[in-house]
Amino acid sequence: MGYPNDLLATRAIIKHGRYALIPPEGRVKNVIPNLENCNTSIIASPELGPKFAMYTVEVLSNGGTTIDFKEDGIETFVYCMGGAGTVTVEEKTYELTDGGFVFAPASLGVGLKNSSNEPWKLLLYKQRYRPLVGYEARIVVGNLNDIPDEAYDGMENVRIKNVLPTDLGFDVNFHTLSFYPGGCHPFVETHVQEHGLYFLEGEGVYLIDDKWLPVKTEDFIWFGPYVPQAYYGAGRKPSTYIYTKDCNRDIEL
């Protein structure tokens, strides 16, 4: 990057175990042994507080996995933010373009490959699966552009897309929320679920705990259970983020 152009500063806010705002500036590249020709940043991990791990991965030309992501009990979700490449799950290959996604149930191997000349930009998510007797997850492949949006909680200026099936075999879901300028949550939410969310476009202000924070494209936010949260869309165009939501399981005591 070279010499800084101004005093060093950051919008990042880290409250271990409670919440975090991590903008793209300041993220460092992490070496992942089974990724080659990739610029990878780990933006969420248990060291911060989440029960999951999330990465941004820029797969360069001819880059990808040298060994599949495969860990016993770990489920994986791959979302394409730009470019094109292939995801292989248990020897079956799927092409992912902008908005495409693949969910691999626990313990299945996931391979990545970019055979194009352009970077392939991904979100990668991993979480330990919580089994439920009589139910199981399955491979899901799709594209956000093919999923119709719906009014969120009866509000026409806030739109939701549900990415994964809602049946009990799944212990996590992904959604997108899109806010037209002036759109907002209907109330300040305080719930047991944790969220990891990544801004795909636009800008606004997000209430995290007791602070309203300006946020924009490429920002990552994590907040843990029972942290108050709400969002107002701002700017001249819609703002959209994709987010995780743990679901379909009771509390473990």
Image (cartoon, grey):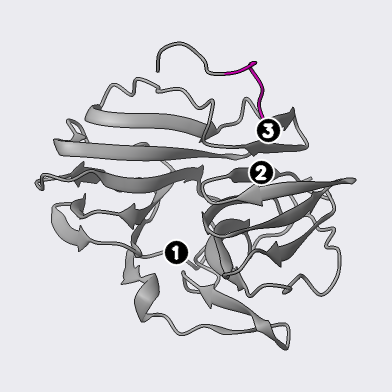
* Quadrant that contains the C terminus: top right
Circles 2 and 3 in contact, beta carbons < 8 Å = no
- Which of labels 2 and 3 is toward the front? 3
Q: Which residues are magenta?
A: 6-10
Mark 2: secondary structure: strand
- Of residues 60 and 71, which is closer to you in this image? 60
Determine if residue 45 is in view.
yes
Q: Amino acid at mark 3?
A: Arg
Which residue has dot 2 on it? Answer: 222
Q: Nearer the viewer, mark 3 or mark 1?
A: 3
| Element class at badge 1 | loop
| Residue 9 lies in the magenta stretch | yes
Mark nearer the N terminus (2 vs 1) = 1
Q: Amino acid at mark 1?
A: Glu
**Residue denoted by label 1:** 136
Task: Estimate how packed mark 3 is, as few (under 14), some (14 to 19) or many (20 or more) residues with alpha carbons within 10 Å.
Answer: some
Residue with the mark numbered 3: 11
Q: Residue at x 28, y 21 (%)?
A: 33
Amino acid type assigned to the residue bearing label 2 in the image: Trp
- Residue 82, image x, y percentages: 31, 54
Q: How far apart are the alpha carbons under marks 2 and 3? A: 14 Å
Structural distance between the alpha carbons of marks 3 and 1: 40 Å
Q: Say whether disc 3 or disc 1 marks the residue closer to the N-terminus.
A: 3
Circle 2/circle 1 CB separation < 8 Å: no
> How many numbered markers are drawn?
3
